[in-house]
């Protein structure tokens, strides 16, 4: 069908075998000046269908009485042969029933011969064309909107004011798990969990009342799964309800992971700060307790009291070490190690930890690769997980320790933020214990969170695991259900290097005294005199300074050599590392020992001590300080 413009004539195909009737129609249209008509005539229906197979006709004027067809069947055949053309029926019969059937079957109008005048005929033909164009535009618009509806990413639901579904798009079927026919038998409330259906009914009333809203709500799928969706619902002008629904289950899960990571990061910073300050106090407690102990004679009652003070300090020191591990502010001593060798090396210790009523089984993959990590810290991780598993099996059970190579894919990384895809070695600890619910599982790595009875745990075991693994560049994930046990999986980056031996070489006994000159830079007013006194008791000459500026001034004023700089890492006015760099310009042979209650970017990168640097972690005992000072002074120059 052609599209006539306002300036172009309307092409009319007249199907009429009677020459007189045809001439009359031509004359009637010729009388009309408001619209030009081009009239083509054929005498048979077959000829008309042939002509309609080509373009260029705007409207058909069809006589029902033709040589090759009679009655309503004439129209029906024309409609089947040219379904897109507007057809106006003319007939010599003034038959109301026939006219009604023709219009119902799709005729644009029914005109009776002998009652047709020019303006009426022109108006009928013009309206037929315009109506047909309107129908085509409506169909095109509906097809356009249907295409959008069926290809849009959101699930779209259309419902009546009572919430009964009237139409849905394919994405709605995918989201709910129902077919289109099944959804059209349901209501909006049917896609809510049972406990939320009262709220659903109220929401339908609100939307039907014209109150549009974007809300998050649960969506119950056909298979019983519950998704979290974002629903944008509003009332359409015709009273129907439109809902655009988007699945945000994965987004909510990732948001929760991010919130948990941010919470852990904030707690970690707090824990590290507390541990730093407390380690200075503990170093003083250890130092003065040991000094006082040396001054008391054997068998003195006060020695027992000092031992108790020391035990309490040791317990406090253990807590601060765990806090530093969680906050990833401890100094690691990484080496290339085999997790298989590490597990086998402490297997007997693990057996003693779990007791006789728990059966330990190893599933170590012979092909498991090597990792770069601190052997002592990874042993601590394994022991903490084993103890945790033992406590989850108070009446006994089975414990499995496994290793394996694994590739964490892009898909896995997307579902387990913030994992980076790549090659890893997995260390897994699985138990047959009581398991955990989702609420407990979400909090297990938080410091001081514990489900144990008061006095049976600090709540730092798993937070220590978390911190050590994260600081080692790895990831830890837990899989658990109530009554079905728990599995912890540790993933550490795989390295293509041979493993180093686990056991360090034994050192021979040696003296810890010396006569060298030591520059001590320590800002803590309690530790500085203590450290000076300890070193002077060992025979060293000590120059003490409360900050980096004072230390440099002492070094400039000192005429002789300075054999060792003992510097706190974090000090006002300049870090220990900056002090060492500036001192090296004038005294390149001075060795350096850093001490600190927590790591600092000045001497470490991601918790790994820079090669060639010496570090002593607070809190330390007098004996530990003496050994470390002697180690640094006796080490060969590089």
Image (cartoon, grey):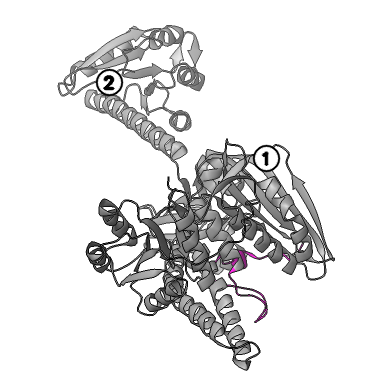
| Place of residue 427 in the rendered image (x, y in percent of width and height, measured from the top left) | 66, 49
* Mark 1 element type: loop
Q: Is residue 45 left or right of residue 177?
A: left
Q: Is residue 286 left or right of residue 591?
A: right
Would you name the residue on which mark 1 appears?
368
Front-most of residues 197 and 444: 444
Res 123 seen here: yes
| Place of residue 464 in the rendered image (x, y in percent of width and height, measured from the top left) | 57, 64
Q: Is residue 614 left or right of residue 34?
A: right
Q: Is residue 445 magenta?
A: yes
Q: Quadrant of residue 565?
A: bottom left
Q: Sequence-wise, which precedes: disc 2 or disc 1?
A: 2
Question: What is the count of numbered marks?
Answer: 2
| Place of residue 295 in the rendered image (x, y in percent of width and height, measured from the top left) | 54, 86
| Place of residue 487 in the rendered image (x, y in percent of width and height, measured from the top left) | 69, 56
**Image quadrant occupied by the N terminus:** top left
Would you name the residue on which mark 2 appears?
3
Q: Is residue 459 magenta?
A: yes
**Image quadrant occupied by the C terminus:** top left
User: From which residue to which does the magenta span run?
Assistant: 433-460
* Mark 2 element type: loop
> Which SS does the magenta portion mostly show?
loop
Picture residue at 70% right of the left edge, 46% below the top: 340
Q: Are marks 2 and 1 in contact (CB under 8 Å)?
A: no
């Amino acid at each position: 069908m052609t599209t006539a413009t306002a300036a172009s004539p309307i092409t009319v195909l007249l199907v009429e075998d009677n020459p007189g009737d045809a001439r009359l129609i031509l004359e009637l249209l010729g009388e009309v000046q408001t619209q030009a008509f081009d009239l083509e005539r054929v005498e048979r229906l077959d000829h008309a269908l042939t002509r309609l197979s080509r373009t260029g006709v705007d409207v058909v004027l069809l006589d029902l009485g033709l040589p090759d067809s009679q009655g309503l069947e004439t129209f029906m055949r024309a409609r089947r042969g040219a379904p897109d053309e507007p057809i106006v029926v003319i007939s010599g019969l003034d038959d109301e029933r026939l006219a009604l059937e023709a219009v119902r079957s799709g005729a644009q109008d029914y005109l009776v011969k002998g009652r047709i005048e020019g303006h009426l005929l022109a108006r009928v033909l013009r309206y037929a064309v315009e109506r047909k164009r309107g129908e085509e535009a409506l169909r095109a618009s509906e097809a356009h909107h249907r295409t959008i509806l069926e290809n849009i990413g959101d699930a779209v639901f259309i419902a009546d004011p009572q919430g009964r579904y009237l139409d849905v798009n394919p994405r709605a079927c995918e989201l709910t798990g129902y077919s289109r026919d099944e959804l059209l038998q349901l209501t909006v409330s049917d896609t809510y969990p049972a406990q939320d259906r009262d709220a659903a009914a109220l929401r339908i009333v609100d939307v039907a009342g014209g109150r549009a809203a974007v809300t998050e709500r649960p969506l119950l799928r056909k298979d019983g799964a519950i998704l979290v969706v974002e629903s944008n619902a509003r009332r359409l002008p015709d009273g129907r309800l439109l809902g655009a629904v988007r699945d945000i289950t994965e987004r909510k899960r990732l948001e929760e992971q991010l919130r948990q990571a941010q919470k852990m990061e904030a707690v970690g910073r707090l824990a590290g700060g507390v541990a730093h300050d407390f380690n200075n106090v503990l170093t003083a407690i250890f130092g003065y307790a040991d000094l006082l102990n040396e001054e008391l004679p054997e068998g003195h009652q006060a020695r027992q009291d000092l031992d108790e003070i020391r035990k309490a300090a040791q317990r406090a020191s253990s807590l601060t070490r765990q806090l530093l591990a969680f906050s990833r502010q401890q100094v690691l001593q990484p080496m290339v190690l085999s997790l298989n060798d590490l597990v086998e090396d402490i297997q007997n210790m693990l057996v003693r930890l779990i007791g006789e009523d728990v059966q330990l089984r190893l599933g170590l993959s012979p092909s498991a690769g090597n990792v770069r990590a601190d052997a002592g810290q990874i042993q601590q991780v394994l022991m903490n997980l084993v103890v945790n598993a033992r406590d989850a099996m108070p009446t006994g059970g089975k414990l499995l320790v496994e290793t394996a190579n694994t590739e964490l894919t892009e898909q896995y990384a997307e579902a387990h933020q913030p994992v980076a895809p790549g090659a890893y070695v997995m260390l897994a600890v699985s138990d047959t214990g009581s398991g955990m619910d989702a609420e407990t599982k979400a909090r297990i790595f938080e410091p001081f969170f514990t489900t144990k009875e008061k006095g049976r745990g600090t709540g730092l075991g798993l937070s220590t695991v978390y911190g050590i693994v994260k600081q080692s560049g790895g990831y830890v994930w837990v899989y658990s259900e109530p009554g079905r046990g728990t599995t912890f999986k540790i993933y550490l980056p795989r390295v293509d290097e041979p493993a180093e031996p686990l056991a360090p070489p034994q050192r021979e006994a040696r003296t810890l005294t010396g006569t060298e000159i030591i520059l001590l830079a320590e800002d803590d007013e309690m530790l500085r005199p203590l450290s000076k006194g300890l070193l002077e008791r060992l025979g060293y000459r000590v120059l003490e300074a409360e900050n980096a500026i004072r230390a440099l001034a002492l070094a400039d004023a000192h005429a002789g050599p300075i054999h060792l700089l003992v510097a706190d890492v974090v000090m006002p006015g300049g870090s220990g590392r900056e002090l060492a760099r500036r001192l090296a310009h004038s005294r390149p042979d001075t060795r350096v020992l850093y001490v600190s209650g927590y790591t600092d970017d000045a001497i470490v990168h991601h918790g790994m001590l820079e090669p060639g640097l010496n570090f002593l972690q607070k809190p330390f005992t007098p004996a530990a300080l003496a050994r470390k000072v002697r180690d640094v002074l006796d080490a060969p120059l590089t």
